[in-house]
Amino acid sequence: MLQQPKKVKFDKLQKGKAKSSKNLNNSFPVQNKISLVSSESGILKSFEISAIKKIINTHIRQKKFYKIILHIFPHFSKTKKPVETRMGKGKGSLGFWFTKVVKGATICTIISLDKKTASIALKNASKRLSLKTFLREN
């Protein structure tokens, strides 16, 4: 199921700019933690985020002691007008939900006893993303 906010005040937002933020996702020390980190800035759509979740769950389903933490959520909406429509007549209809990701931001973290399966799951999940990523072990 695609992720989207339950309730927002305004569905159609203006573009805005991607702000560089401090990455506070690694503030708690835990052993056997592997993170998927973006190596470039861009946007991630809601269907990419749900695909990550689905792939990781299928890879780690048999393991008993694991926890998946998603650090991103699609808060922003993108609108699109139909093709061959004349100018004017308001903003287009809602296209999809997305989130802005800056360089170095943690996308997903797996806390697991088995590092090998967790790293394989994150590598397979990163193939579905439109951004370049790398793995960080703690």
Image (cartoon, grey):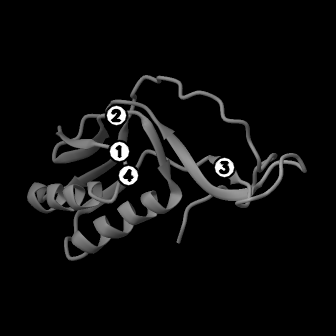
Residue 20 as seen in the image, left or right of residue 64: right
- The x and y percentages for residue 2 are 54, 66
* Residue with the mark numbered 1: 131
Disc 3 target residue: 77
What's under tag 4, amino acid-wise?
Ile
Which element carries disc 4, helix, strand or loop?
Answer: strand
Q: Secondary structure at mark 2?
A: loop
Which of the two discs, 4 and 2, sits closer to the camera? Answer: 2
Q: CA distance from mark 1 to mark 2?
A: 7 Å
To which residue does mark 4 refer?
69
Residue at 65% x, 49% y is 78
Give neighbour class at mark 3: few <14, some 14-19, many 20+ (Cα, 10 Å). many
Per the image, label 3 sits on a secondary structure element best described as strand
Q: Would residue 62 be found to the left or right of residue 99 on screen?
A: left
Say whether marks 1 and 2 touch (CB < 8 Å): yes
* Residue at mark 2: 40
Q: CA distance from mark 2 to mark 3?
A: 21 Å
What amino acid type should be assigned to the residue bearing mark 2? Glu
Q: What residue is rendered at 33% in x and 30% in y?
A: 104
Marks 4/2 in contact by CB < 8 Å: the verdict is: no
> Which of pointers 3 and 1 lies earlier in the amino acid sequence?
3
Percent x, y of residue 93: 76, 58
Q: Compared to 16, does 32 lie above or below?
A: below
